Image (cartoon, coloured by chain):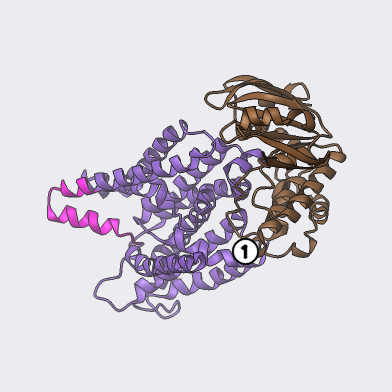
């Protein structure tokens, strides 16, 4: 269980509490500036809240050694920065730094699960945006963390790559990992998350299964947009009224 | 041990003996009178000093580029070399340079002062994201402050002789250096390179940005401390015994990077070896060139370094287009 209790961070979070369960895909949604990335970074142990605390399996996250924390929680930042032109394999192997081993088996498995084997010796600069995003996710998977926290992992990806990446994340959740994603696209959250947290100005506006947490009344209240959902559960599309 | 390291070690094994013989007058160990004294007391310490300083600058440059995630970073950016130069200039100004130990000690004190200032500022900048940028700006501030104080010291010099002594020292050279300089610089540089090597894993993680590095268990404070002390020891001891020698830390990692897998950690030792080789060869060339007086090493390396820097900038611009 990864639990945030009454998290307060000046100007960004204003008393957010949520207990996240392993084996689920949780989406954090909200308008720009609602505090989504801040909440994710608090849960990842990268930002210390001014008040409240984050518990990992009932132990305070801040009391863990950074390496212990890193072994448990994998974090994928939004910008996807890669400063040096490493080979795909060496990039993915960075995910083993918390364990301090080369982890050949885990790196091979991560490359295979994201269909990157054929690129493994290629410099990362020769990959397309979608392939790069897969390599960065493989880096997180190589560490075999119990929690995968990703900030907008699907932004800037085309539809095919978005669905492929979501499928990988769902598979990780199926294998028992807790997956927490900041998502801008409400339809992706609606169709692929098990649970949605909606933030508004640093507060939790709703929390629950997607059909309930993202109902149209809430969307109107939080985003100020009058919209309605089309389609069947699991294959919804959002259209403005 | 990997291939670039072996190759560079081999080149050094060839270059060091050759450098002992090279000079305006080439030395024949069997025919030249007093060959043993010249080799043992002049050329060997000078060669070892070139290797030491070059090694330190190369490793510091590789670590700095990894830390700042910028191929244009140079060890001078932390303000440690200007700090060390200020210390040395003060000792010249105060007339303490007559003792063999005081000038290097003043320079080391200057480097330590710059490191302390950096550490004080860094201690207040541990936020996510802003850390490294603020740190770099602080380093540049220290560099320009030390530069201004150095200029002030020069302008306060009591006579033209003192001024020229300071200016010439600032140009950097290995002329007339001896064993005491080696004993001072070599251990400090080796410790510095070892610390930078320890920072390697953290630098690798920084490839993915500061937030990802922290999420991989890297402690920004520890990494920063390793960098500051490592660069301080290598660069500070280099300036203490040879004056300001620029561009080595910038050039060498670039030349070496294509030979490695481009991870910052696998660049540090090869850069140290290549830096050693570059300074050793450049010092020999300075010695051999048929000029009226010997070309100062610092000037020689800057003459090569500046066009190289321009070449880098143009190449980066081409790639960005």
A226 displayed left or right of A193 = left
Instruction: Give the drawing colour for chain B.
Output: purple
Residue pointed to by mark 1: B260
Label 1: few (<14), some or many (≥20) within 10 Å? Answer: some
Host chain of mark 1:
B
Q: Residue A164: within the magenta?
A: no
In the image, residue A78 sits, relative to residue B46, either above or below, namely above
- The structure residue drawn at horizontal position 35% and vertical position 72%, both measured from the top left corner, is B287
Asked where in the image residue A119 lies, by quadrant, the reply is bottom right
Q: Position of residue B71 (x, y in %)?
A: 50, 58
User: What span is in magenta?
Assistant: B151-173
Quadrant for the C terminus of chain A in the image: top right
Q: Is residue B26 visible?
A: yes
- The structure residue drawn at horizontal position 69% and vertical position 49%, both measured from the top left corner, is A94
Q: Position of residue A235 (x, y in %)?
A: 81, 44
Q: Position of residue A92 (x, y in %)?
A: 72, 53
Of A54 and B132, nearer the camera is A54
Instruction: Give the drawing colour for chain A.
Output: brown
A97 displayed left or right of B59 = right
Total count of labels: 1
Q: Is residue B180 visible?
A: no
């Amino acid at each position: 269980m990864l639990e945030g209790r009454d998290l307060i961070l000046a100007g960004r979070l204003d008393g957010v509490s949520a207990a996240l369960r392993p084996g689920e895909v949780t989406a954090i949604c909200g308008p720009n500036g609602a505090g989504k990335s801040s909440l994710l970074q608090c849960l990842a142990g990268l930002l210390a809240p001014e008040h409240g605390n984050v518990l990992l399996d009932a132990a305070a996250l801040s009391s863990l050694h950074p390496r212990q924390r890193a072994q448990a929680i994998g974090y994928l930042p939004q910008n996807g920065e890669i400063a040096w032109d490493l080979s795909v394999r060496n990039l993915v192997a960075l995910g083993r730094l918390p364990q301090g081993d080369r982890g050949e088996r885990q790196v091979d498995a991560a490359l295979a699960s994201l269909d990157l084997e054929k690129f493994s010796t290629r410099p990362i600069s020769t990959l397309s945006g979608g392939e790069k995003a897969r390599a960065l996710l493989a880096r997180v998977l190589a560490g075999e963390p119990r929690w995968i926290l990703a900030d907008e992992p699907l932004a800037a990806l085309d539809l095919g790559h978005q669905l492929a990446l979501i499928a990988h994340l769902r598979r990780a959740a199926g294998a028992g990992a807790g997956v927490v994603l900041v998502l801008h696209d409400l339809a992706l959250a609606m169709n692929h998350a098990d649970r949605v947290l909606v933030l508004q100005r640093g507060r939790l506006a709703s929390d629950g299964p997607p059909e309930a947490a993202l109902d149209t009344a809430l969307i109107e209240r939080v985003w100020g947009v009058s919209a309605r959902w089309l389609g069947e559960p699991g294959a919804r599309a959002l259209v403005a009224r | 041990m990997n291939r670039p390291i072996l190759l560079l070690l081999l080149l050094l094994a060839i270059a060091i003996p050759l450098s002992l013989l090279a000079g305006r007058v080439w030395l024949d160990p069997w025919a030249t009178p007093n060959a043993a004294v010249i080799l043992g007391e002049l050329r060997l310490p000078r060669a070892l000093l070139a290797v030491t300083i070059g090694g330190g600058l190369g490793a510091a440059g590789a670590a700095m580029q990894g830390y700042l995630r910028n191929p244009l970073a140079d060890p001078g950016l932390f303000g440690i070399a200007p700090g060390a130069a200020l210390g040395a200039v003060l000792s010249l100004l105060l007339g303490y340079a007559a003792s063999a130990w005081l000038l290097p000690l003043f320079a080391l004190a200057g480097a330590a002062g710059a490191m302390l200032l950096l550490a004080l500022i860094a201690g207040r900048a541990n936020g996510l994201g802003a850390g490294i940028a603020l740190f770099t700006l602080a380093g540049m501030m220290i560099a320009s402050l030390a530069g201004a104080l150095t200029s002030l010291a020069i302008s306060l010099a009591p006579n033209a002789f003192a001024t020229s002594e300071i200016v010439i020292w600032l140009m950097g050279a290995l002329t007339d250096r001896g064993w005491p300089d080696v004993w001072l610089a070599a251990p400090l540089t080796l410790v510095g390179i070892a610390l930078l090597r320890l920072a390697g894993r953290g630098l690798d993680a920084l490839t993915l940005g500061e937030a990802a590095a922290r999420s991989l268990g890297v402690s920004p404070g520890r990494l920063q401390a390793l960098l500051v002390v490592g660069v301080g020891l290598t660069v500070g001891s280099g300036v203490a015994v040879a004056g300001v020698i620029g561009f080595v830390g910038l050039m060498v990692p670039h030349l070496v990077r294509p030979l490695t897998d481009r991870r910052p950690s696998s660049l540090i030792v090869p850069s140290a070896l290549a830096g050693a080789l570059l300074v050793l060869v450049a010092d020999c060339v300075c010695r051999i060139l048929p000029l009226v007086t010997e070309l100062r090493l610092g000037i020689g390396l800057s003459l090569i370094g500046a066009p190289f820097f321009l070449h880098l900038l143009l190449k980066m611009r081409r790639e960005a287009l």
